[in-house]
Amino acid sequence: MALPLANLPAILRAAGISVVEYPGWSTRTQTDGPFAPKGVIWHHDASPPGPTPSEPAYMADPAHNGAQCWVDTRGVWTVIAAGRMWHAGLGAGWGRIAANQGNRDAIGIETDHTVGEAWPAALLDSLRIGTAAICRAYGWDPATSLCGHKEYALGRKPDPDRLDMAAERRTVVALITNPKQSQEDDVVTPQDIDAIARAAAQATAPATVNELMSRGIGLGVPVEDHSLPFSGAVKYLDANASATREIAARIEGLVQQLIAAVSAHGVPVSAIDYDKLAAAVNDDAARRMEN
Ligand SMILES: [Zn+2]
């Protein structure tokens, strides 16, 4: 007879999740008690920071504690077992998951994460989407069927570290109502904006001294050959360290303003008034030189 989670890989794949079926998963089960899941417990595996691809092999060993699923830092799910696993242990219970019956009542989802580690967006995104797919397929309401190990085993367990489970439940409910396919994360983070602004600033950096001056940014020191490549000009000025520092400060100021402008307003770099920006940089440099 098929074990309860025989259709789990198919459920996850239908949600766009990349799934690895760990060898033997469909017949793997602990035999010390029944498995009749009506909820999900999220965990972290407490492996060292960064990818720890050896985790599924460890968890698949019947002598070890392990969960039915493991999500790696890229958001790929490994399905380890279709039956009962030892992931919950003792606890006061949570929602539909009874006290000390987590291994009977819940599917365990481990994540490649430990205390203090940053959560990769791809991992979280996939964890949420996959959990929503599971709850939808089995007809479970996350409000009573999704908890963290730290909620089920309150005071005994810290995982999953730093996730606000009340907020996570709301997110998963929203994903059930409005399914989203797992894919490259499409949430724009402050890091994304920073990276975009830096790339844009580099792309618009002057190639030559002439080009720099044509944008109204004077070097403040005599340069004989204005067609010098800009990097060459910096080398040329190396002998005059204070002038080089002043130029570097102006360029850095320009880049910072570009980053600030893009971050604050989300405007495309093409919409930035370059002349205004250059004037502002020059004014600022002039002010600093007066002081
Ligand atoms: Zn745990």
Image: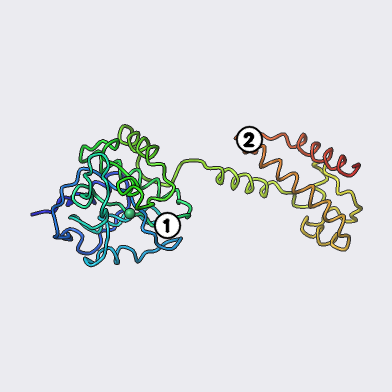
Question: How far across and down, in percent of the image, does residue 84 sit?
Answer: 18, 55
Badge 2 density bin: few <14, some 14–19, many ≥20, Cα 10 Å: few
Image quarter where ligand 1 lies: bottom left
Q: Residue 118 location in percent, x, y?
A: 48, 52
Q: Nearer the viewer, residue 146 or 175?
A: 146
Residue of label 2: 264
Q: Quadrant of residue 93?
A: top left
Q: Nearer the viewer, mark 1 or mark 2?
A: 1
Above or below, comparing residue 175 to residue 226 in the picture:
above
- In the rendered view, does 213 fall on the left or right side of 131? right
Which quadrant holds residue 282? top right
SS at mark 1 in the image: loop
Q: Residue at x 56, y 46 (%)?
A: 191
Say left or right for 159 vs 211: left
| Residue contact between numbered discs 1 and 2, judged by CB atoms under 8 Å | no
Q: Which residue is mark 1?
A: 114
Please name whichever residue, 257 or 61, is drawn nearer the observer in this view of the structure: 61
Of the pair 51 and 35, the residue shown nearer to us: 35
Q: Secondary structure at mark 2?
A: helix
Amino acid identity at mark 2: Ala
Q: Amino acid at mark 1?
A: Thr
| Left or right: residue 172 compared with residue 82 | right
Q: If the image is split into quadrants, where does the C terminus sit?
A: top right
